[in-house]
Image (cartoon, rainbow, N blue to C red):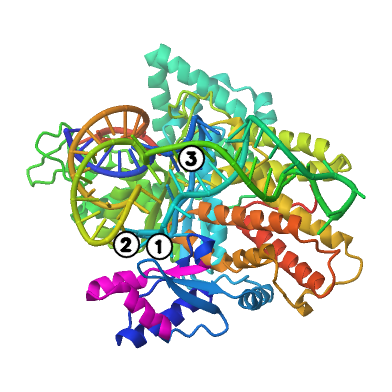
Amino acid sequence: MTLLQELESRLAAAFEAALGEPVAAPVVPATDLRFGDYQSNAAMGLAKQRRTNPRALAEQVVAKLDLSGLGTADIAGPGFINFRISPEAFAVRAKALAADPQLGVPKTGEGRTVVIDFSAPNVAKPMHVGHIRSTIIGDSLARIARFLGFKVITDNHIGDWGTQFGMILHGWKTLLDEQALAADPIAELLRIYREVNAATKADPAVLETCKGELVKLQAGDEENLAIWRRCVEVSKEGLQRIYDRLDVSFDHWLGESFYNDRLPGLVEEFLGKGLARVSDDAVCVFSDETKAPENDPFKVCREDGWTDNPAIIRKADGGFLYATTDLATLEYRIDQWGADEIWYVVGVPQQLHFRQIFDAAARWGKTGNFRHIAFGSILGEDRKLMKTRSGDNVGLIEVLEEAVERAAKVIAEKNPELVGDEAKEIAEIVGIGAVKFAELSQHRLTDYVFSWDRMLALQGDTAPYLQNSFVRIRSIFRKLDEPFDVSAAELHLSEEAEIHLARLLVRFGEVLPLVLEDHRPNLLANYLLELARAFHSFYEACPVLKADEPVRSSRLALCDLASRVLSQGLGLLGIRCPERM
RNA sequence: GCGCCCGUAGCUCAGUUGGAUAGAGCACCCGCCUUCUAAGCGGAUGGUCGCUGGUUCGAAUCCAGCCGGGCGCGCCA
């Protein structure tokens, strides 16, 4: 049980004793340390319901409150109940944390299976900065969910069956340079895609040829299928190299093509069950969720009164769309993998699509906690959306390489003793970490303008700041000559910096479940920044190795615990910690 | 036209779901390396939380209406 839960449980008992019935009495970390460590605003709300004096109620509750072994409580303002935790209680808590492999994090996801759908690039196109959000946020959520006890299945739902294959097939047959393909497959595929794309705009006949190639592919033409298979294969290899570098992995790579066979049956089932109907020769799933008024120019008013924007699952020409594939995918994940939850880490512009899918799934009888974990857009310098198609986007690899290069430069300047492979390895950890942290430390819905300096900053609120706190601790332990038994060390907290560090360490288990309440890794990132700040202050204020016993052992134990929470926390963001930097 | 998201310090952003005197980083200014890694620490400056009303003990947060920006809305994914 976390400290916060312990306080809530004791406070609930006191409220029940005062009011004669059980009530909810939430506790939160205090907004300001001057008020204490934790606070509850419950007395004010409950007094209002009962039309009694909030301060009087708070006094009544505090009188019945048993905080033995934890600290004290007092009342402030209109009826805040403020908790002050004693240094001894923090010490006991921190000590218990050190002995716990979970570091005080409860397994709130135990027994639940979640499928996380993220990254999902199109094959035959390189990943650019626009893909970074889904990949990094999704990976982090997967790590966190696993740590909280969920059975996590990650699935890279790649776009391996889009209409872009018409152009690629045509380009492959007329423009392909085998040597270039061997050297850099994705670059070569991009080149032919771009050239054909340009040609279609100049000459409509080329577009017709491409469409013809696509139709042949979809009809099962052997030659085209063979080309398609090779395209997908080389693309996956190229993608895998980036994922390796990002330390991101997937349990499955079931792309759109995997579901092709199921689509016709799915549409028939929807028609048969009355969940979809034909409209202008297309098969549509309507939902009543978004009603449009009379003067809506986009309104579609059918004879039976359905008035919303439908999800089309079969085109007038008989082709299927991504709504169809998404429904088939959702069914597969439930039936084959036993998914209780599916999280889609996809940009906010697709919100309507997911509403339609989830609504259709519900009426189809597919139950589960389906969540569209939306994120904001990355904008270009002109504040306009970075378009995938324009192609002149900053590539994801370029960003990573620039990040590692900048980190290497800083290492050479700050710590010249580090050389060779070790320096290279550290530059990799620091550079990639900086990119990931820049992404994960802000609210996922925030739009931002892509900026090298923002994404690759190495000072201030960044991954290196956190990694450096870890490195400082490791350095202390390297200088320690004698063996040190952490489990035997007693904690004595007297300096404010020590107490504050312990206060934050103990909160790790309170923050992590919060992250998954709204799927927001930035809550963890912000917590870790606060923790690292507390450590750096402690480090400046409290000598460790030079301190006399028993303070020395106590501080060593505190450092050890801090390093474990920091590296675990960063690990959950997909960021590694170097031993030195 | 309808729907969704956003507007917080010069800049980039947090703000634990309605709490107390709104916080960080960058930039700028003043201090701190003969002590465990200065990618650091301590301090100073910086605010009409887009505007106007409403709800209540209490609003950056909830509601309504404006202003400004972004995105989405039948056969692309």
Q: Chain of mark 2?
A: A
How many numbered tags mark residues here?
3
Secondary structure found at label 1: helix
Question: Where residue A88 sits in the image (x, y, percent)?
Answer: 64, 78
Q: Which residue is mark 2?
A: A366
Q: Chain of mark 1?
A: A
Q: CA distance from mark 1 to mark 2?
A: 8 Å
Q: Are marks 2 and 3 in contact (CB under 8 Å)?
A: no
The answer to whether residue A68 shows anywhere in this view is yes
The numbered disc on residue A134 is: none
Q: Is residue A53 magenta?
A: yes
Quarter-of-image position of residue A331 = bottom left
Amino acid found under the numbered disc labelled 2: Lys
Q: CA distance from mark 2 to mark 3?
A: 26 Å
Question: Where residue A361 sits in the image (x, y, percent)?
Answer: 30, 56
Q: Main secondary structure of the magenta part?
A: helix
Q: Are marks 1 and 3 in contact (CB under 8 Å)?
A: no
Label 3 packing within 10 angstroms: few (<14), some (14-19), many (20+): many
Q: Is residue A113 magenta?
A: no
Q: Which residue is mark 1?
A: A334
**Of the image marks 2 and 3, the number of the one nearer the N terminus:** 3
Q: Which residues are magenta?
A: A36-63
Q: Are marks 1 and 2 in contact (CB under 8 Å)?
A: yes
Q: Which residue is mark 3?
A: A160
Q: Are marks 1 and 2 on the same chain?
A: yes
